Amino acid sequence: MTTTAQNATPRIESLLVAAHRNLSVLQERRSALERGGIGQDHLAADEVLTAFALLGEHERDAMLAEVGAHWAALQSKGLVCGGIENATTPVLRLIAHILPHTKAIGSIWQQIRGAVDAPEPPHGTWHSATSVCGSWGQLARLHFSVQDVEHLMIDPDPVFGLQPVLVALDPDRCHTGSFPFAIDNGVITMRLRHRNGNVYRQVVQATVEEMA
């Protein structure tokens, strides 16, 4: 009895360590999915993430079968990256959880990014600086607030070396945030999908200061 208990303790500890590691990864992936356009109401709650983490590698084959057919489409929408074989089973479980809510992401992404000639947002919808300047490569942070908006796309010029980000928002709340980037000569385009269905565009110009 004593030997069994002693042998069981390291096994339990290793399972708890793995569950803690899984939970940390799941929290990161949940944040990434929200940035990719999945609404908070459709994401797994904290207690559900914990359950996914504790299940570990249980039923991996079933999760691979359920998610595998959708993996390429999810990659094209920026919701997953890499090969499915490299994804942990808890992450696959999280992806399976949000699968029904990924179908509209492509159309929303295309609608927002395709609005190249959209007008500026109505007064009170968007607040931020319209220009930022500094030394080349200097880390800057664009602070903003937005309200009455369902989706926000932050689309930096390629010169910044950053990918576009689509964020789902609650239009009934005022949201504040910031966007970090390294100073260069280029434009950061903010595209806002308003609660009325219209898409608006706010341009922020970044400029490298000339050396004296």
Image (spheres, rainbow, N blue to C red):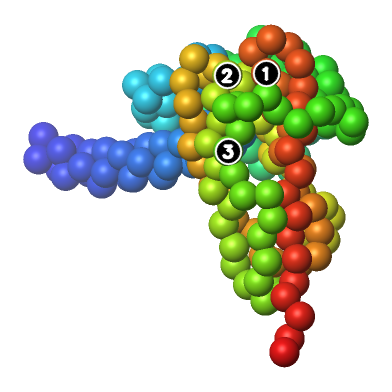
Q: Are marks 1 and 2 in contact (CB under 8 Å)?
A: yes
Taking the spot 81% from the left edge, 59% from the top edge, the residue there is 186
Tell me the CA gap for discs 3 and 2.
Answer: 12 Å
Per the image, the residue denoted by label 1 is 194
Between 34 and 133, the residue placed more toward the observer is 133
Between 142 and 211, the residue placed more toward the observer is 211
The quadrant holding residue 192 is top right
Per the image, the residue denoted by label 3 is 127
Per the image, the residue denoted by label 2 is 148
The quadrant holding residue 200 is top right
Eye-nearest disc, 3 or 1: 3
* Type of amino acid at the residue the image marks with label 2: Asp
Tell me the CA gap for discs 3 and 1.
Answer: 14 Å
Considering only vertical position in the picture, is 97 above or below 28?
Answer: above
For residue 162, side relative to residue 35 (left or right) = right
Between 118 and 67, the residue placed more toward the observer is 118
Q: Residues within 10 Å of mark 1 (few under 14, many from 20)?
A: some
In this view of the protein, can residue 33 be seen by the observer? no
Tell me the CA gap for discs 1 and 2.
Answer: 6 Å
Mark 1 secondary-structure assignment = strand
Which percent across, then down, holds residue 40?
51, 20
* Type of amino acid at the residue the image marks with label 1: His
